[in-house]
Amino acid sequence: MIAILKAGAPQAQIDNLIRWLERQGLKIHISQGDYYTVLGLVGDTSKVDMELLSSLDIVQSVKRVSDPFKRCSRDFQPQDTVIEVGDSGVKIGGGNFCLIAGPCSVETHEQILEVARAVKAAGANILRGGAFKPRTSPYDFQGLGKLGIEMLSEAKKETGLPIITEVMNINQLELFDDVDIIQIGARNMQNFDLLKEVGKLNKPILLKRGLCGTMKEWLMSAEYIMSEGNERVILCERGIRTYETYTRNTLDLSAVPTLKNLTHLPIVVDPSHATGQARLVKPMALAAAAAGADGLMIEVHNDPPHAWCDGAQSLTPVQFADVAQRVQKVLEAVR
């Protein structure tokens, strides 16, 4: 349920209303817009007398939210969420477009530093790199773990780029203090214990769509994080599994405008994992920018043929610089 308050409602009356609602066992989400304030009521709202609430002088309208996701609903918060990444000055959402780039996995000090320097020079805002790698085969490279995070931190210190990397389970979270954005991968989209745990943290969470996840399931996973108090969630469309075999996954770009209507959370697109082929990354990146995405997550490696993981979908630094330049032209054209 949401209550839209009238413009210019006295703060004292708003505070009294919030206290009254909280005494009924509800949690209140406050969204302050330019012209009105929205109170989101979370909990058993069946106890709330809608007619009484609607009759209050400061209340403009009251309505029930039919969607199962509440905190991430556009009804609860009409304006876009803008997520600030640490003290880097980087913002995601609300018209702020970000480029996240880096290798699939951190391999060596030299590799991650070289890639970090190159993507920053090309315009990237955030450095990505896998320290813990979920792999289909138990015999494939699983990542460097703690050492990989330390290497990412070194690259962050040298370049100033904030870093993002994936957590696999709750026990690893203690290693992520210096990580600016924690990524929840596709395979963990419905790892509810992990979602609740990162929901207790005070840092942005990038939530990738599951391989077979519907948009509603994806948003409900975001709701798990937000229900614990962390509202700094970034959605990432990375392709879904279909019967198509010519690409690694099927990139669902319709998710971008659809979710823009449903949620206030920012949405970035990962064309690298979606297509699995470097030659398809550029056209899909341009299409994602045109569709209204708030950012892109692109794999970049200084030597793709010899990458330890997913070299086939990785761009070279030169290719990434070209994509970054063309994306800016698309953004200028559609704004």
Image (cartoon, grey):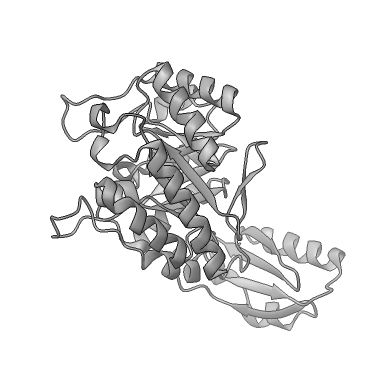
Between 46 and 240, the residue placed more toward the observer is 240
Residue 102 coordinates in the image, percent (x, y):
42, 35
Quadrant in which the N terminus appears? bottom right
Number of marks drawn? 0
Q: As displayed, is residue 57 above or below residue 328?
A: below
Residue 164 coordinates in the image, percent (x, y):
48, 35
Quadrant in which the C terminus appears? bottom right
Residue 35 coordinates in the image, percent (x, y):
76, 73
Residue 213 coordinates in the image, percent (x, y):
29, 56
Q: Is residue 230 left or right of residue 21?
A: left
Q: As displayed, is residue 1 above or below residue 197?
A: below
Q: As displayed, is residue 61 above or below residue 165?
A: below
Res. 318 visible in picture: yes
Between 333 and 180, the residue placed more toward the observer is 333
Res. 72 visible in picture: no
x 18%, y 35%: residue: 136
x 21%, y 55%: residue: 241
Q: Is residue 203 left or right of residue 248?
A: right
Between 221 and 97, the residue placed more toward the observer is 97
Between 168 and 22, the residue placed more toward the observer is 168
Q: Is residue 297 left or right of residue 138?
A: right
x 23%, y 39%: residue: 312
What is the quadrant of residue 167 in the picture? Answer: top left
